[in-house]
Amino acid sequence: MILVMPLIELSEGMGGIKIKCLPELDEYYCKISEDPMLLVKLWRKENAKCIHIVDRDSFERRNNFMNTTVVTYLAEAVDIPLEYSSEFSDIEECRVLLNAGVYRIVLGELAIIDPIGVRKLITEFSPARVAFQCRVKNELVEFPVSGRTFDIKTFITLVKNFEGDRMVFYNEEIISKNLNYNFSKIEKIGFENNIKITLYEGVQNSQSLIELKNLRTQFIDSVIIGLPLYENKFPCQQIWRTAEAEKIELFFKD
């Protein structure tokens, strides 16, 4: 069973991806698209079991105070697990978020900046709550801030040394070209290294999601989907949008 996680991108505390809708409902969906709480409620109503949130400001080296504040509030206020990816400043920031109820954090540069702190964090909160971003470009795992690169096997060895057991696989070329991943190739990486894998994007429509499910992968167990969900590329979404249109004003009062 593949877990599908809707993506929410935060910038200055607001959602950054617009939901496609009928022209007459544009005002409503603009509000939902921008308001993280309404977005979480929408994906929860549409049967999401977990949501992946990206702190866009941190990756673009801007002040991310609003995003961190919003995620902390959401973690305390909603009944759905939240996974949070950010360029965390230090281990204490991670600890505060996990204690606040964020289900899982995804580490980037911090994994190579403070390896001792990362190991302690995993010991304190368990491997299930700390994942590692595997950002691949030209077959190498890149850390853009430090400029360091690793081959994939070396990177996974690093994760294993922390007692980590999950990575979020992000291929820049695939995502920039709106392509689908080679699922079998990534599953092989998981098998050879005994590591759980969450795919970041790279599943563009229902056909590719069905293909992934039919592979019955053991190591790819989840996928984060952004734009295709916001553009209603999955058949069930048309039913949900129609149902929402009939009671959209009530949605804001829930």
Image (cartoon, rainbow, N blue to C red):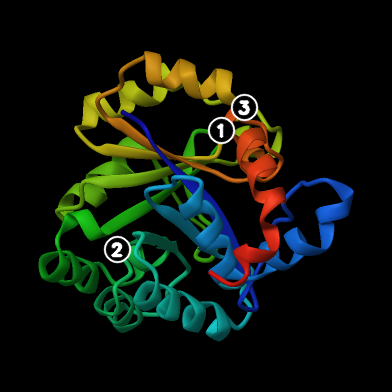
Q: Residue at x 36, y 31 (%)?
A: 2
Q: Counting residues from the N terminus, which is met first, the one under dot 3 or under dot 1?
A: 1
Q: Residue at x 69, y 64 (%)?
A: 249
Q: Residue at x 67, y 46 (%)?
A: 230
Q: Given the image, on which type of amino acid does mark 1 rest?
A: Gly
Residue 139 vertical position relative to residue 134 in the rendered view, above or below: above
Q: Is residue 3 left or right of residue 30?
A: left
What number is the disc on residue 103?
2
Q: Counting residues from the N terminus, which is met first, the one under dot 2 or under dot 1?
A: 2
Q: Secondary structure at mark 3?
A: helix
Q: How many marks?
A: 3
Gap in Å between the C-alphas at discs 3 and 2? 29 Å
Q: Given the image, on which type of amino acid does mark 3 rest?
A: Pro
What number is the disc on residue 106?
none
Q: Given the image, on which type of amino acid does mark 2 rest?
A: Tyr
Q: Nearer the viewer, residue 185 or 97?
A: 97
Q: Counting residues from the N terminus, which is met first, the one under dot 3 or under dot 2?
A: 2
Q: Secondary structure at mark 2?
A: loop
Residue 1 location, quadrant: top left
Q: Nearer the viewer, residue 96 or 20?
A: 20
Q: Position of residue 22 (x, y in %)?
A: 83, 46
Q: Residue at x 60, y 68 (%)?
A: 10
Quickly name the residue at label 1: 202
Name the outermost residue toward the right: 23
Q: Is residue 96 left or right of residue 53?
A: left
Name the outermost residue toward the left: 123
Q: Is residue 190 left or right of residue 58?
A: left
Q: Position of residue 12 (x, y in %)?
A: 65, 78
Quickly name the residue at label 3: 235
